[in-house]
Every structure is written in C-alpha cells, then in structure tokens.
Amino acid sequence: MEVVQTKGQIIKGKPVADQISENLIKEVNELVKEGINPKLTIIRVGARGDDLAYERGALKRCENIGITTEVLELAEDIAQEQYIETLKKVNEDKDVHGILCFRPLPKQLNEESIKYVISPEKDVDCFSPVNAAKVMEGDQSGFPPCTPTAVVEILKHYGVELKGAKVTVLGRSMVVGKPAAMLLLNEHATVTICHSRTKDLANVTSEADILVAAVGRAKMVKENFVKEGAVVVDVGINVDEEGKLCGDVDTDDVLDKVSMITPVPAGVGSVTTSILAKHVVKAYKLQNNK
C-alpha cells in the first residue's frame, strides 16, 4: 500500500488490524468447511488488569474471525508443578492449536524452566526458546512475538520502505526490542539497537529514518531524538502524571518533525491481537500440513 508521506501523519493500528482480520476470516471459513475450528487456549495466573484487558481484546478478535477460544485461569499462588502439569495437558490436547501464556508470571513460578515446557508448535507468542531462535535465524516456521510483528505489519501497511532504511530500536527486551530488530533485519533494514546506557542517545536515534520506541518510559522521546521526516513507531504503554495512557514518545513535541507516528493508545497495541489470531491459524495449518 503506497501512501504519500505528509508531515505529522498519525498512523493508526485499526486499519492494519482490520485488513489482517478480513484475510483471516476467509481462511478460517475455508477451514470450518472441513469441520475444523482453529483453537487458542489462554493460560492466565491471577487477574492482573493488563492481562484482562489484552484477554478481552484477544477473545473478541478471535470470536470475530471464527477461532475457538478457552481461558484457563489459575490461582495467583499456584505451585510450579501444577502450572507445568496444566501446560502439559494443553500441549497434548489435539483440539488446541495455539497457546498463550500470560507473562510475567508470579515470582514463585520460574519462567526460565517453564519456557522449555510449552510446545514450540503451539507457542503463538514466542515464549519457547525454539521460537526465539527461529526469529534469529529468519525461520518462517516459527512464531515471533506478537508486538514486534505488529510493528513490522504497520510499517508495511502504510507503505514505509524498509529495505535499506536506517532503523533504530530503542529498547533491548526479549519481548519487543531484540525480536523487533531481528524482524526488521529480515526485511533488509540496517538496524541499530539502543538502550539506557547508550552514549549520546538522542544523537544516535536522531539519525534514524525509522525509530521504534520500546523502552517503557513515559514521553522520554522528545523532538531532539528524531530526524526530520522520520517515521516513529511508539510501542510504549505508560501512564503519565495526569493518569492518562501515553507512549514512550512525547507525541505533541515531535509531531511537527516526523512524517508518520503511531498513537498511544490505538496504535501498535490494537494490531497485536490480530497477529495473535494470525499465528493461531498458522499453527493449525503447520500442525495439519495445510
């Protein structure tokens, strides 16, 4: 999709999510004709507000597309053995094609060992080290994390040229920063990763054609962080001093300088549930040689 770049264009996630969903509805309709519904199981410990908000969005998105869903809510104080037992049962359930484990897990659960238990074939949000390795290798049979995948989908949807572009990713987490860098490398961008200890941070980020902000600090990215005409993707979800949701970028401060920027809310976050659904359908197809 080619878009003429203008100054300060707000590029929302909903059109991207809707396009992905439209394609998935057609795919799922064909599968349902064969008598099979792709199925997602969500495993949630306790009832954290951010987990519940994402879950509601995921369930609604899957329902609209025709994907069957199931939520396993486990006690906040669940023991490691019980959690692993639950996860193994879902691994072995042939009717389940995708598994989403909400993280971070409570302190009594050891993610470092649990991540080796989840079936890589059903791990639709890159919890398993197998899928993390596939992201590194550019192996298309894996499942990258949904949020960095959403970043790439948004850029493609709005016609942003990635090949040869200078991209800076601000943040180095395994949830967003590192996988986003790998996915953008796979699109032939030239990628720099920055973090809190990068020297002359604003000077480094201001050289980027595309800046992906995923550092988790409210309105940290100011006008001096961005290059004239840059495209900015704001992955941060924070609460400002007034109690309002905001991103890692001070949008008002950079708007006159950027060519495009994703808003918070209604930006990257609104695409992630569509990516999740896409991964469930992909998992079903891979498991059934479709």
Image (tube, rainbow, N blue to C red):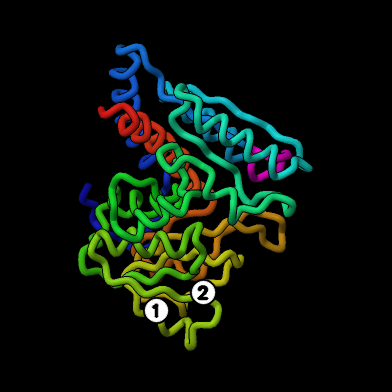
| Frontmost residue, 62 versus 98 | 98
* Quadrant where the C terminus is found in the figure: top left
Question: For residue 155: magenta?
Answer: no
Report the residue marked by disc 1.
Answer: 206
Observer-side mark, 2 or 1, equals 1
List x then y, in percent, for residue 188. 23, 64
List x then y, in percent, for residue 228. 34, 75
Query: Which numbered disc flags the more N-terminal residue, 2 or 1?
Result: 1
Q: Regarding mark 1 in the picture, which secondary structure is present there?
A: loop
239 vs 12: above or below: below
The residue type indicated by label 1 comes to: Ser
- What stretch of residues is rendered in magenta? 44-52
Q: Residue at x 35, y 15 (%)?
A: 32
**Residue 228: which numbered mark, if any?**
none
Compared across the picture, whether 26 is left or right of 115 comes to left
The residue type indicated by label 2 comes to: Lys
Q: Residues within 10 Å of mark 1 (few under 14, many from 20)?
A: some
Compared across the picture, whether 46 is left or right of 208 comes to right
List x then y, in percent, for residue 21. 37, 32
State yes or no: discs 2 and 1 in contact (Cβ < 8 Å): no
Q: Residue at x 43, y 55 (%)?
A: 262
Per the model, the C-alpha gap separating discs 2 and 1 is: 10 Å
Report the residue marked by disc 2.
Answer: 222
